[in-house]
Amino acid sequence: MNIVMMTNTFTPHVGGVARSVSAFTQEYRRRGHRVIVVAPEFGNIPENEIDVIRIPAIQNFNGSDFSVVLPVPKFLTSALEKFEPDIIHSHHPFLIGATALRLAHILELPLVYTSHTMYERYTHYVPGDSQGMKRFVIKLSSSYANMADLVFAPSESVAAVLRERGVTTTIDVVPTGVDIGQYTQGSGPGFKAAMNIPAEAFVIGHLGRLAKEKNLDFLTNVVAEFIAHHPQAHFLLVGKGPMEDDILAIFKRKGIADHLHRVGILDQPLSTSAYRAMDVFVFASTSETQGMVVTEAMAAGVPVIAIDAPGVREVVEDKYNGCLLDNQSIKLFTQALDWVASLSPAARKQLQDAALKTAESFSMTRSADKALDLYESLLKKEFVQRHEEYNAWKGILRLIETEWDILRGVAGAAGAAIGGDKGRDNTPL
């Protein structure tokens, strides 16, 4: 099967969408399918990329760590025609996602859309953020889903939200799977030694993009409060982003900066070693559609403490593989940390074994099996021209051109926003 993945974020970006596209692409190729990824240019793009078409983009848009694509060059359409794709899979409703819709229409191919992001959670990047803006992006992304032939939801929670918002296209739950084998590698003790973390320390860990929408201000205050009263505890922070300095400032105010260990972005197998150095993984984001890092941590045998939210509640089971907290409370979170820290070695081992068992149910093998079966089911159906819906979508895009100053903030935030630019062939994207 020839598959086109169209995404506004891809390697070397480390966000959840980029990691999801990369994971599925690798698994499909491993099984003998050919995949072309269409993505923006980023700094430090890997050399000698195979079957990746890069689109020129503005880097670090609006002070974020995302890119916004520039007008799409004509060579894209001709390159994809030569590729003879069977499926176009869009991972955003904006920018390259709009191009995916147009190409599916032109080439008469089925369009699959994965609803990775709750975009209304990212409008804080927009000057003059408002409830009207939130309603607008909800309507726009829902309308896009209704023009796809099939929608993938990363979790049942997200599928339920999409249905509530009026998405009538068939929705199937297809989480991004975890390559379980990768997380048996690495050395936790060796990583602790390399980071100057005492061997006997209780290590609280977090991995991800360090940005406001991840609720990191709350999480940092929780961890700092706990460490201030438990000097044997240390915080291992893996990732980069605009909140790095804020996190460090909180630890400095508490006088415990030497208990914060920042390591930046890690590739495998070092990221596995980082996970395996943790005694517990903490997660406070409520903006996720699927907590990929939560399943990764569990694949490394690390229990998780998280706030109950979409994409997380499907993975974390309270007092089984970690703690699922029903509200955002520093007291409750620190109590959960204290509960894990005070467990006997035998009880801690039970928690770790439960985490491993949970991760197995989210394996990449299972997720790819389901996705490919769904692709095959679409290929057996006759192509349906949606002229009315497509023309309405083009009208929305023309409207967006006049609202560019407002909507470009969503692009910076989610890495997947709406552009008012036209393609070089003068066809609205």
Image (tube, rainbow, N blue to C red):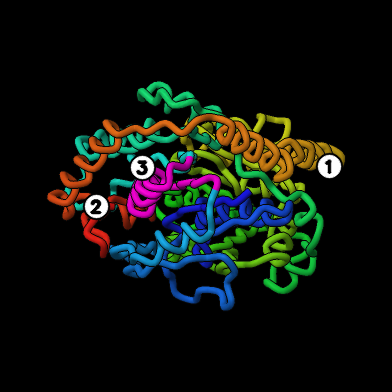
Disc 1 residue type (three-letter): Lys
Question: What's the distance in space between the residues labelled 1 and 2, CA to CA?
Answer: 56 Å
Q: Examine the rendered structure and indicate whether residue 421 appears above or below residue 402.
A: below
Residue lying at 42% horizontally and 69% vertically, measured from the top left: 41
Mark 1, residues whose alpha carbon is within 10 Å: few (<14), some, or many (≥20)? some
Where does label 2 land, which residue? 428
Given residues 415 and 186, the one toward you in this image is: 415
* The quadrant where residue 189 appears: bottom right
Question: What's the distance in space between the residues labelled 3 and 1, CA to CA?
Answer: 38 Å
- Specify the label residue 254 is tagged with: none
Question: What's the distance in space between the residues labelled 2 and 3, CA to CA?
Answer: 22 Å
Question: Can you see residue 337?
Answer: yes
Residue 395, percent across and down?
Answer: 19, 40
Residue 299 vs residue 285: left or right? Answer: right
Disc 3 residue type (three-letter): Tyr
Residue 374 vs residue 134: left or right? Answer: right
Q: Secondary structure at mark 1?
A: helix
- Residue 372 is one of the magenta-drawn residues: no
- Specify the label residue 349 is tagged with: 1
Q: Which of marks 1 and 3 precedes in the sequence?
A: 3
Q: Which of marks 3 and 2 precedes in the sequence?
A: 3
Mark 2, residues whose alpha carbon is within 10 Å: few (<14), some, or many (≥20)? some
Residue 91, percent across and down?
Answer: 46, 47
Where does label 3 land, which residue? 119
Q: Nearer the viewer, mark 1 or mark 2?
A: 2
